[in-house]
Image (cartoon, grey):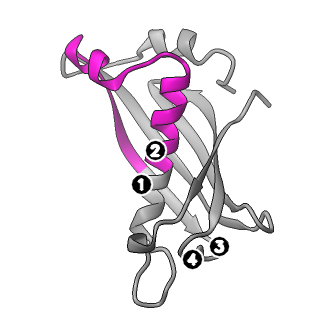
């Protein structure tokens, strides 16, 4: 298994619903933030890439909710990457920091568009070579 990227985050009160738990849609935001921070750590800028006509685009998200997070809780968001044909598949998970309980896991599929056309995006293979499984 290749390296896993992870970051620590904290639940903000406004991300919680009336039950006091994180609204399910916010896990997509946490996963997206993790992917963006991962790419930034590799020296990749989504803005600069877009200006060059190269856009990674999410095509599918499959999330499984296991344990709830509540306001103020710290958590670790992690990812690993797999390549399947033209797809980049991000295996992502969120664990509560206090007890390491799995709160959410997901598989996010993305493709690369170059000037609006589907591309294998080989540049990303080189960029993520230490992480791609």
Classed neighbour count for the residue bearing mark 2: other residues with Cα under 10 Å, few (<14), some (14–19), many (≥20) = some
In this figure, which residue is indicated by the disc labeled 1? 29
Q: SS class of the residue under badge 4?
A: loop
Q: SS class of the residue under badge 3?
A: loop
Mark 2 and mark 3: Cα distance apart in space: 20 Å
Cβ atoms at labels 3 and 4 below 8 Å apart: no
In this figure, which residue is indicated by the disc labeled 3? 66
The front one of 120 and 80 is 80
In this figure, which residue is indicated by the disc labeled 2? 33
> From the viewer's perspective, is the residue at label 3 or at label 1 nearer?
1
The front one of 98 and 84 is 98
| Start-end of magenta stretch | 31-60
Q: Which mark is residue 51?
A: none
Side of 103 relative to 71 (left or right): right
Mark 2 and mark 1: Cα distance apart in space: 6 Å
* Magenta span contains residue 39: yes
In this figure, which residue is indicated by the disc labeled 4? 70
The front one of 87 and 93 is 93
At x 65%, y 24%, the residue is 132
Q: Earlier in the sequence, mark 2 or mark 3?
A: 2
Q: SS class of the residue under badge 1?
A: helix
At x 50%, y 34%, the residue is 37
Classed neighbour count for the residue bearing mark 3: other residues with Cα under 10 Å, few (<14), some (14–19), many (≥20) = few
Side of 26 relative to 99 (left or right): left
At x 80%, y 68%, the residue is 99
Q: Earlier in the sequence, mark 4 or mark 1?
A: 1
Q: SS class of the residue under badge 2?
A: helix
């Amino acid at each position: 298994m290749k390296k896993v990227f992870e970051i620590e985050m904290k639940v903000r009160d406004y991300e919680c619903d009336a039950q006091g738990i994180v609204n399910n849609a916010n896990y997509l935001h946490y996963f997206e933030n993790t992917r963006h921070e991962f790419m930034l750590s590799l020296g990749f800028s989504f803005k600069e890439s877009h200006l060059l006509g190269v856009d990674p685009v999410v095509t599918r998200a499959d999330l499984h909710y296991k344990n709830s997070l509540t306001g103020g809780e710290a958590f670790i968001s992690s990812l690993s990457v797999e390549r399947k044909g033209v797809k980049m598949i991000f295996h992502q998970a969120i664990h509560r920091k206090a007890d390491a309980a799995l709160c959410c896991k997901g598989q996010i599929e993305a493709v690369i568009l170059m000037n609006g056309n589907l591309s294998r995006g080989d540049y990303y293979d080189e960029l993520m070579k230490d992480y791609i499984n």
